[in-house]
Amino acid sequence: MNRIKLKYTRLRRKFGSAVIVALCVYLSACASLVTPNYSQVLTELRPGAYTLDPQHAYVNFRVGHLGLSSIVGRFNVVAGTLDFDPDNISDLTLQGIIEAASIDVNSDELQDTLREGAWFDTNTYPQILFSSQSVERGDNDVLNIAGELTVRGVTKEIVLQTRFNGGADNILTGKYTLGFSATTQIKRSDFGMDAFAALVANDVEIELHGEFQRN
């Protein structure tokens, strides 16, 4: 009886190991199918006209509250285009559109307040716009994209510290895709949003993450 149990235990261990190995091979194969021809080298990325994938687009922001914590939010409806050639970085153009009413801070009451006139005034100014003007190379493949940001009808120049995280053919979409991330900082008072200055910080940190699909 003990011999039978021992053989059963050995067979179970062998079978379990085989399943794990097979699963790893399968997952590796899936990964290679999803992202063939992957490269993180900027000069190896493919030139062309790109459109932001709305299902993989994130505009996040953070602003201090009472000097104790931060209000963290995002915009849920974003669109954008990119014209990109790694051999002619200075010709890069980036356009972005954010639907201001799509602001999301995990509080319906606060979201309604932020849509009102003292803040984003979304009925009068439904969209936040960005249009690039120039590009300079920074260190470690960071691109400093200078452009005009328009919020509440007020336009100011900002600089997006941008990185292309890589590119790959995506078999799930059939499109070559670029990974993109950027950061910048603005002052809300520059755009006429200076309410509750004693409670809410003036500096707003912004993070952008997304995937651009080649047209």
Image (spheres, rainbow, N blue to C red):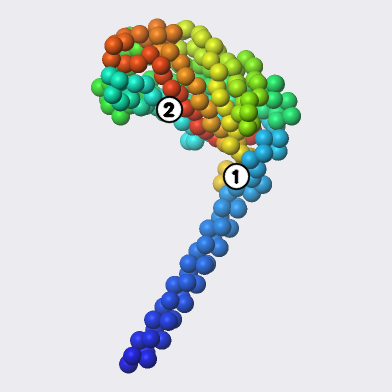
Kindly tell me whether residue 77 is visible in this rendering.
Answer: no
Look at 60% across and 22% down and name the residue there.
Answer: 144
Look at 58% across and 31% down and name the residue there.
Answer: 163
Residue for badge 1:
170
Q: Badge 1 local density, few (<14 within 10 Å), some, or many (20+)? A: some
Position of residue 178 in the picture relative to residue 99 (left or right): right
Look at 64% across and 31% down and name the residue there.
Answer: 141
The disc placed on residue 34 is: none
In primary-sequence order, the first of circles 1 and 2 is 2
Residue for badge 2:
60
Give the Cα separation between the discs numbered 1 and 2: 25 Å
Picture coordinates of residue 91 (x, y %)? Answer: 70, 21
Position of residue 140 in the picture relative to residue 105 (left or right): right
Picture coordinates of residue 79 (x, y %)? Answer: 51, 26
Q: Is residue 14 above or below residue 39?
A: below
Q: Amino acid at mark 2?
A: Asn
Picture coordinates of residue 196 (x, y %)? Answer: 29, 11
Q: Badge 2 local density, few (<14 within 10 Å), some, or many (20+)? A: some
Position of residue 83 in the picture relative to residue 108 (left or right): right
Mark in front: 1 vs 2: 2
Instruction: Say which of 132 and 146 sits in front.
Output: 146
